[in-house]
Amino acid sequence: MQLTEHQKLLAGQDYDYRDPELQALLAQGRRLVETINTTGDPEKRQAAIQKLFHHVGQRVTLNGHFEALYGDHVSLGDDVFINGNCTFQDSNRITLGDRVIVAPDTKFYCGQHSLDARQRFGVRPDGSHYLITHTQPITVGNDVWIGGNVTVIGGVHIGNNVVVAAGAVVVKDVPDNCVVGGVPAKVIKTLPALD
């Protein structure tokens, strides 16, 4: 069975972003994000939030301007608080657990390109060129506080009971019960486990 372009995207394989299904998902995401960012009607905004994301837990707050590509690839647990100017480049799944706080200007980037410049563009059978993107999911556990201006790269799993210090760039998995910081982020302090 041949995979659709959307299935290839989620599997981290080469995919054609021009695919009609992907373009429809992107267009829907743009419309819903615009509604979320511009409407003054709380009910209309909440309806757009419910429709944009794959899953929305209870008591989810988007505070201020928000950006996402698809939206449908994002799942939010209960009591999630996302502050202003956050970007979810959800070309793969982004999952936030329960009681996750995301400070302003945080970015989640699921897509990446080859280090080899010769491998960044492909050629379709019709001779047109396309940008080759590989994607990986991002998973954030429960009871996590992500500080301001943090960047999280695709393929990363952040454990439970974690604090990510402001300005960190998270490029590898983070274990439970710790504070990480720096570029690239590393463990700088252990936290007591939650009961």
Image (cartoon, rainbow, N blue to C red):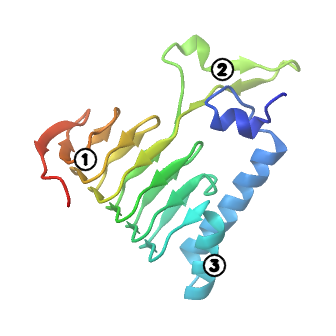
The amino acid at mark 3 is: Ala
| Residue 186 x %, y % | 20, 35
Q: Which disc, if any, is residue 47? A: 3
Label 2 CA crowd tier, 10 Å (few <14, some 14–19, many 20+): some
* Residue picked out by circle 2: 121
Q: How far apart are marks 1 and 3 (CA)?
A: 32 Å
| Residue 91 x %, y % | 60, 43
Name the side, left or right, on which 85 lies relative to 35: left
Quadrant of residue 43 in the image?
Answer: bottom right
Q: Nearer the viewer, residue 6 or 32?
A: 6
Q: Height in image: 79 above or below 44?
A: above
The amino acid at mark 1 is: Gly
Q: Which disc, if any, is residue 167? A: 1
Q: Nearer the viewer, residue 61 or 11?
A: 11
Quadrant of residue 45 in the image?
Answer: bottom right
* Residue 41 can be seen in this image: no
Q: Height in image: 48 above or below 125?
A: below
The amino acid at mark 2 is: Phe
| Residue 118 x %, y % | 59, 11
Instruction: Give me the residue at 18% from left, 47% from top.
Output: 179
Name the side, left or right, on which 13 lies relative to 101: right
* Residue 115 can be seen in this image: yes
Element at label 2: strand
Instruction: Give me the residue at 13% from left, 50% from top.
Output: 191
Label 3 CA crowd tier, 10 Å (few <14, some 14–19, many 20+): few
Name the side, left or right, on which 30 lies relative to 89: right
Element at label 3: helix
Q: Which disc, if any, is residue 66? A: none
Q: Distance between the residues labelled 3 and 2?
A: 38 Å
- Which badge, 1 or 3, comes first in the chain's sequence? 3
Is the N terminus in the top left, top right, bottom left or bottom right quadrant? top right
